[in-house]
Structure formats: structure tokens, C-alpha cells
Image: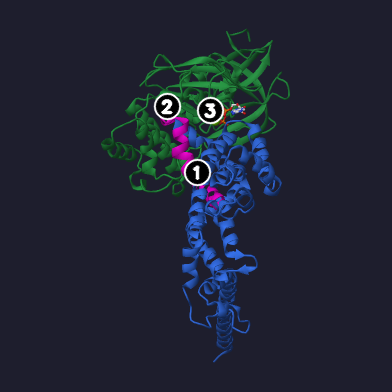
Amino acid sequence: MATVDINNVTKHFDDVRAIDGVTLSVQEGEFLVLLGPSGCGKTTLMRTIAGLEHPTSGEILIDGRNVTGLPPRARDVAMVFQSYALYPHKTVFNNIVFPLKAQGIPKEEWDTRVREAAQVLGLEKLLDRRPRQLSGGERQRVALARAMVRDPKVMLLDEPLSNLDAKLRASARDELQTFQRRLGTTTIFVTHDQVEAMGMGDRIAVMSGGKLRQLGTPHEVYTESADTFVATFLGSPGMNLIPRNGYLLGFRPENFLPREAMPSQSQIETFRFDVKRVEYLGADRLIYGIVDHAPDDVISIARLPSAVTFPIEVHENHEFAVAHEHLRYFDADTGLRISPQPL
Amino acid sequence: MNNQEIISRKGEGLAANQRFRETINAILRQVALYTTVGLMCLFAFFPFLVLMINTFREDQDLYRPQNFPFFFNDPPTLFHITQLFKETNYVVFLRNSVFVGLVVVLITLAIAIPAAYSLARLTGKWGERAGIAIFMVYLVPPTLLFLPLFRMVVALHLNDTIWSLIVVYPTISIPFSTWLLMGFFKSIPKDLEEAAMVDGYSRAAAFLKVVMPLSLSGIIAVVVFTFTLTLHEFIYALTFISSSAQRTLSVGVPTELIRGDVFFWQGLSAATIIVAIPVGILYNLVLDRLISGFTMGAVKG
Ligand SMILES: Nc1ncnc2c1ncn2[C@@H]1O[C@H](COP(=O)(O)OP(=O)(O)OP(=O)(O)O)[C@@H](O)[C@H]1O
Ligand SMILES: [Mg+2]
């Protein structure tokens, strides 16, 4: 268990700013999720923490010790690569035991520790196989076993679930989380899947364009998004933003309901909503349309749970509403959250 | 018997007929295949066969034109083999060749592996260009180089010793091997080494424990290529060395077993076949690795 402090780290590749001044503290035993779109610098940040990249500036502290100049082997960090990076010429057993050999752990312990890790991840039957004889899910578990077997200070997981099908993914997510809770190892988990991030993280760090946009609990980043990027990146679909009186007014699709479906006593803001398209998604209905007085290219979306059976037709101009407590305000230029403005 | 039945019987007959034809075709295909393979094998093996037979033939058997050439018309004899070992420097040539071969292989590996690895991994886009430039060196023919290299060998006081060959052969083997190994190292994902480094190894250890085992085919290809090169190289071996005791097989055998216009055919045959058979067996043992070694280098280089 350890803390990780990232102090104003930048990493440039020629003229690409892969990481652009990130400051971030990970607490002891925390499960931190690094969330961001493809190419935003998540992998680069992980590699910098692991010591595979040297930051252009800034420093990295693990457990309070400055490790910026240290090679990976001196950092006691384990990493699961996006590609898993299993050693193809070694059996599963030898893959898992490989880090133990490097740590100078006595030979007598190898077998017990490998079997322990294998058992936790359900790999006992596969120990003699080679990586190419494993399915994607099994490979991922081997990679995890290899990372945890040595009980590192910090575990870095770079989109370890991205190669799994939806079902396996859900169960792997579960396993991984229980597992991390049990070990209590400080873990940084990279993903570009917000559902994964929301479900797993103690806290979520949202990145974009090499910058850290917001750090907070899943609830915080979702309901109190710090800027328009976070607001629109999270949620499916993301937050509606409507330009108004020089600022941006935001509200989430699930809070944007037909007037008739709103509880009558709450304070609401009403909008005339020009319905363009209706999409049925089973559990939900998505209504696409244009809010009155909004520019034509600003499509807003309402997400009605199937409990709201109220019929809505295409081309209808219907009255929709949002409760005041669900309205968010953003600066039109910087995109940053601002205090409530006159409506 | 109604019509239906007649038709279905007829159908069965046709089906049986067809099956019979298919079986015959399959057999014919097998026969054609194995005949071709057999002929190819015979073709490839023929020189060895002739050499093996000639080694044990008496002079008068060999030289009489009306004798069937691929057969012992007189009883076989060990005379020429004994002569080869007792009256020529053959054993010395053999020893020299093996020694030169092994030392050159070691030098080549020691230099080409680190060179290829650094070109493949550490120098960015210039690595590729440097690799191509190095490969170009390999394309310069020895016929152009033996005179200047001879001057250098003399300057090093190595002329007329096998050490001259040990110094010069790596100039051919290293460029080619570096280029070949570069392809190998590039085809191994960087992630693997990095995983090893995160797992607690230094870059050197990661290289030894992960990259080397995965490049085994390439390394075997380099060993085979280099050793073969030293075995059959002729120009340098001929020009740098004049004393018989320092010669290697490629020059020693023809100079000692061809005197003027007298060819000691049986001795020549024996000298060749004694080297060819162990080398052939050795290569066969690593054949799969060897093929993947050369083809992989070719595609990814
Ligand atoms: N070695 C490199 N040389 C040059 N540019 C690089 C290098 N590595 C990464 N980049 C660039 O840095 C940026 C961040 O890359 P990174 O791999 O960290 O993204 P990511 O967030 O992990 O994306 P993904 O979700 O697709 O894995 C990208 O624009 C990428 O092109
Ligand atoms: Mg990535």
C-alpha cells in the first residue's frame, strides 16, 4: 500500500503534448479510475508512473519518495499493459513467477504464491499452457495474476478489460474490484468506458487533451461536473448545453422530462421542445429535438424511462421542463462551471 | 419395382461409381506426389551419392570409361581415406576450419546482437537507415576487397595465419547478421521488454530473458549463415594464407589433393563428404527454426 503523487507532470513527444501539467494524488489503498477519450494521455501517464517514460518536467512520488529518476525496477509498481504483454515463450506458471524471481523471493515460496494468485483468478488448470493457447479473458487474468503475485506498492491497470466481451467484462469488473478491496493495493485503473469508471472507482480522474479535467467521486464528477468537457463526456448521452444570455445552460437528458411528468410542487424551468426524432432503447426512450430559442444545430436530448408512458410524437412541439436543482451553468468561453445565472 | 425405386437404385449406382473414381483419383494424386518428391530427393541427394561411392572406389575402377559409373565394379577400398588422413594435412584443415568457424560465430554474435538490438530499439528512425547502410556493406564483393584487406592483414602481422581470417570474416558476417537480427528484434513487441522491466528486471536482463529466447530462430540463422560462410569462403582464405598448416578446408583440400593436373578424386570426394554429412545433419536439426529465421528476417527487415 502506498500513495502516489503526481506533481505538475508534463510529457512531450516532439510537439505532441501527451501529458500537459497533471497534478494528482492517489491515496493509500484507493481505486482510482483514469477516464478519458482515446489519445488523451492515459497510457502515457501510466507509463510515466511506472518509469517507462521520463517526464519532460514535474515529479512523481511513490509513498512520499521521489522516484522520478528511478528505473521501473526500483519503483515496486506492477502494470497490466493494454496488450497484456504476456511472455509468449513462457507457460502461464512461468509468466506469473517471473516477477518473483526478479524480486529475489526465495525459491520455496514461488510455488505457493503462484498457486495462490492462480487460484484467486481461477487459473489453476491453465498453469501449463502458453499464452497463445488462452482466450482473451484468460490472458487478462494471467496478466493480473502476474501483477498481483508480488504484492506491489501500486498496481497500474491499463484498460485491462477492453478486450473482453460484455458479459465477461461485467464479471471481470466485479472480480477485479472485490479483489482490489481484499488486497487493499493502491490501484490506478485506466479506461475510456465511463460505465466502467462509474461502477468501479473510489474516485475518477477525468482527462482530456493531456490535462486533468476533474478529480472526484463518481457522483461528484457526474452531478457536479467541473466543465463542459466532463459534463458532456459523462452520461449517455451527455449533458445538454444550450447557449443563453452569454453563458451555457446545462441539464442532463434524464432530468429533461415532459412537463406533465414533473412533480407539480418542484421549482421548474420550462422549455418548448421541437421533437425531431424518437429512439426506443428498451428501458428508455430518447427524444431528440431543438429547444425553443436555441440555435438549429444544438440538438438536445431527453431520456425518458419506460415508466413515463406519455406519448410523444415526432414533429410535435411539446412542453418539457427541468427542475431548478438540476440546472448547471458554464462559462461560454472557458467551459468552466459558474454560479447560477439569471434564467 | 416401381419407378421411384429404379431411379433411386440408379442413383446409388452412380454414387458408387463416383466414389470409386474419387478413390482412384486420390490414389493417383498420392502416387504422383510421392514420385515427384522421390525424384526431387534423388536429384538433391545424387551428388552425395556419387561422392560416397567414389570415395571407396579403386583407381582402375574409377578411370575405366566403360565401367558403370555409379557402382563398385571392383571391390570397395578404404585406401584413399587412409591416405587422406595419413599423408595430407586434412586433419589440420578440419581443425582450422572448425576453429575459425566457431570463433567467427562468437565474434559475430557478440557484435551483431547488441548492434541489431540498439538499431531496432533505441535510435528511432535513423536506426532503419543505419541498418540499410550496414546491409549495403555486405553487398560489396570480396573480389574488390581482398587487396586492401590484405594490406591491413599484413599491417597487423596476421598474414599467413588463421587469425587473418578470424579478423576478416566478421566484416562479411556482421553486416548481414545485424540486418537479419534487426528484423527479429523489431518484430518483438516493445511491451514485452517493458513488462519485464516493470516486473523488476534491468533492460539488459529483460533483453536476455525475454528478447533473446524469442529471437532464437534468428540467432540460429545467424550461426548457420556465419559458420557456412567460413566453411566455403575461398578468396580470402586463398590470398591471405600460404602455409599448408594454416589453411582451412576450402583452400587446403583443393591445393593438397590437386597436384598439377592430377586430381585425387577419391580423396577429394572423401574430404568433401566428411564435412558435408555432419553439417547437413546439424542443419536438419534446426531446419524449422532456420527457415522461420530467414523468412521472418526477410519480411520484417
Ligand atoms: N512514443 C510516442 N511518440 C509520439 N507520440 C506519442 C507516443 N506515445 C503516445 N503519443 C501520443 O500521445 C498522445 C497520448 O497517447 P496515449 O497512448 O497516452 O493515449 P491514451 O489515452 O492511452 O489513448 P487510448 O485510450 O487510445 O489508449 C497521443 O496523441 C499519442 O499519439
Ligand atoms: Mg492507452
Q: Start and end of the magenta stretch? A: B198-227
- Residue holding disc 1: B106
Secondary structure under badge 2?
helix
The spot of residue B252 in percent (x, y) is 56, 57
Mark 3, chain letter?
A
Please tell me how crowded label 2 is: few (under 14), some (14-19), or many (20+) other residues with Cα within 10 Å: many
Marks 3 and 1 belong to one chain: no
Task: Specify the quadrant that holds the N terminus of chain A.
Answer: top left
Q: Colour of chain A?
A: green
The crowd level at tag 1 (other Cα within 10 Å; few <14, some 14-19, many 20+) is: some
Colour seen for chain B: blue
Query: x and y percent of residue B297 in the render?
Result: 59, 47
Q: Nearer the viewer, residue A253 or A100?
A: A100
Residue bearing the label numbered 3: A43
Q: Earlier in the sequence, mark 3 or mark 2?
A: 3
Is A25 left or right of A44, judged from the image as shown?
Answer: left
Q: Nearer the viewer, residue B190 or B144?
A: B144
As drawn, B216 above or below A216: below
Secondary structure type for disc 1: helix
